[in-house]
Image: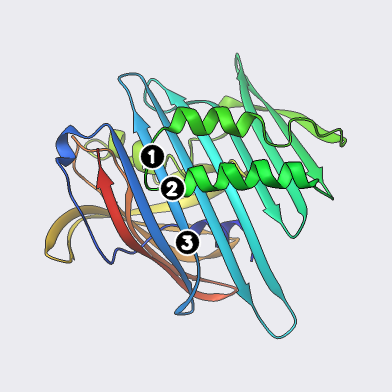
Amino acid sequence: MNRFTFYTICLLMMMQYTFAAAGESRSVLLNYDILSQGKHVGDVTTKISQQETRHVIIERSHIKASGWLWKIDVTTVLSEEFINGNKLTNADGKTFEEGAAHWTTMKLQEDDFQMQYIKIPKTSSDEEKIFASLSAEAASGASLNTDKILSLSESVFSTSKEASEEWLISKRSFDTTWNNLPFYIQLRAETSIPETLNILDSENLEIDRFAVKNIGKETMKIGTEQVSAHHLIFTTGKSNTSHIWINSENNSIPFVVRHTGKDEDGAFEIKLKSIVFH
């Protein structure tokens, strides 16, 4: 299951929808079930907090599935910080899988991002305990304190001595990240959504170019609620076409309403169990 598959699986189809003064929201908690070929394979919790000139996105995902000769059990906590709308300042991704870990970071330095990848082939019991605490905090529905999660994330694998890969990329080499795509579309929906987008996967530190087709606004029925959403089609040479719907309320924190498609593993979809605005 590649990163694009993993990410697109993690992006959404609603089952239940709970509103609480959406127009006045400053933070939002979203919980999703992940399905692959109709089978439940995991879950995603996304926490977004928004201030006047800054917003933070925390995504915690857990995938657990198995086949005839394979199995996967992987947990990832990914954070991204933005200022002045869509300006990414830093990102941090930590993935734990069967005793091994991967750590990616991005930090803006003037016109370039300092990229770093660290592989930890064998984690210690202390590192696993700290990561478990981070994962639990990011998945908890009791708190939307994203700054606390960012602080806790700094301590995970901080003593690792493993060799790392480092390189620079220009901040102009991508338009947005996957997690920040709804914010990017919200700012441009009333003028013109680009026909092509370079989208950064901040977990794997990869950039892919997509052709984008704007179908327009569609009304979607989620439970008893009627939701207006922008319907977009994304196509790249590395995967099959996928469809993404993003809510079109300008006074609300933006989020993906639904995402469907196919890849080398077959059909995927995500069902949102709950969404709560604060």
Q: Which residue occupies 69% across, 52% down? A: 96
The front one of 74 and 244 is: 74
Cα–Cα gap, marks 2 and 3: 13 Å
Residue 140, disc: 2
Cα–Cα gap, marks 2 and 1: 6 Å
> On the rendered structure, is 86 left or right of 62?
left
Where the C terminus falls, by quadrant? top left
Residue 43, disc: 3
Three-letter amino acid code at the position of disc 2:
Ser
> On the rendered structure, is 113 left or right of 55?
right
> On the rendered structure, is 4 left or right of 15?
right
The front one of 56 and 266 is: 56
The front one of 23 and 198 is: 23
| Whether residue 65 is situated above or below residue 109 in the rendered picture | below
| Whether residue 73 is situated above or below residue 77 in the rendered picture | below
Tag 3 or tag 2, which sits nearer the N-term?
Answer: 3
Q: Quadrant of residue 206?
A: top right
Among all residues in the image, which is located at the extreme top?
A: 110
Q: Residue 38, position in %: x, y?
A: 44, 79
Q: Which residue occupies 30% across, 57% down? A: 274
Tag 3 or tag 1, which sits nearer the N-term?
Answer: 3
Q: Indicate the secondary structure of the residue bearing disc 1.
A: loop
Q: Residue 135, position in %: x, y?
A: 56, 47
- Quickly name the residue at label 1: 143
Q: How is the image coloured?
A: rainbow
Q: Does any portion of residue 178 appear in the rendered image?
A: no
Residue 69, disc: none
> On the rendered structure, is 73 left or right of 22?
right
